[in-house]
Image (cartoon, helix red, strand yellow):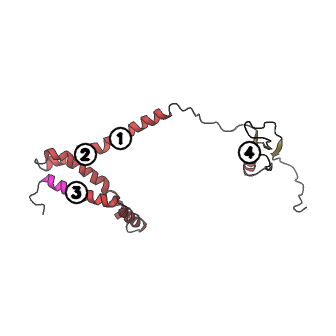
Amino acid sequence: MFKGRSAYFKLLAATIVLAVMALVFLSPIGNVVFVILLISFIGIPVAMALALIPPIALFLVLASLFAWPVRKRGWKAVLAAFIPAAAAMFLIPAGMNILAEREAQDLVSGDNAPVAAPFTGRSLALLVRPRHKEECLNLCQRALVSGAVQTFIVASMKRTWPEPDLEAEGTAYWLERREKCEPVKLRG
């Protein structure tokens, strides 16, 4: 069928076949087939091979474009077109990555959000809204048991807006080690 055809014609035929396969593979139906193949144990190698079709098709499209001017010169000229195609597939994304990194650096250059040092205080106060119970709940318990703080204060503020009530009184919780713990009645 391809006997007597030029090297460029054969490259173009392979490019068209793989490009059509890539379009099918990238379609919603192709994605479903890919997932089904991945789910089945036997289909995993086939799915991995199918995943290579789009980049290979792109490579062959680029090679066909670079081989167009030398299409009458035979296989060596057509194969030589693979070099700029491979370079383009590497250099274009690499250049775009460099530009993206520079833009990201420019965008964050004005940010000065230093990494906060770990909390080193001995006490921590939690100001809650009015009518909330001053209980030692999850945050309080974790902070005390982990040793992050020695005292945890829960205070109910009279007002929260526009300024918090820093004169609020609350309940302080702490853990203490005792020689002997007193018995506790579970029912009143």
Q: CA distance from mark 3 to mark 4?
A: 67 Å
Q: Earlier in the sequence, mark 1 or mark 4?
A: 1
**In-front residue for pair 131/70:** 131
Mark 4 residue type: Gly
Mark 1 touching mark 4, by CB under 8 A?
no
Mark 3 touching mark 1, by CB under 8 A?
no
Q: Earlier in the sequence, mark 2 or mark 1?
A: 2
Residue assigned mark 3: 16
Nearest-to-viewer mark from 3 and 4:
3
Q: CA distance from mark 3 to mark 1?
A: 27 Å
Residue for point 76% across, 47% down:
144
Mark 2 residue type: Ala
**Mark number, residue 94:** 1
Against 24, is 136 above or below? above
Specify the quadrant that holds the N terminus. Answer: bottom left
Q: CA distance from mark 2 to mark 4?
A: 61 Å
Structural crowding at the residue carrying mark 3, measured as other residues with C-alpha within 10 Å and reported as few (<14), some (14–19) or many (≥20): some
- Residue 44 percent location from the top left of the image: 38, 64
Q: Which residues are magenta?
A: 1-16
Residue for point 77% across, 40% down:
159
**In-front residue for pair 79/9:** 9
Which element is circle 1 on?
Answer: helix
- Residue 40 percent location from the top left of the image: 41, 68
Q: CA distance from mark 2 to mark 1?
A: 14 Å
- Residue 111 percent location from the top left of the image: 54, 33
Structural crowding at the residue carrying mark 1, measured as other residues with C-alpha within 10 Å and reported as few (<14), some (14–19) or many (≥20): few
Mark 3 touching mark 4, by CB under 8 A?
no
Residue assigned mark 4: 147
Mark 2 touching mark 4, by CB under 8 A?
no
Residue assigned mark 2: 85
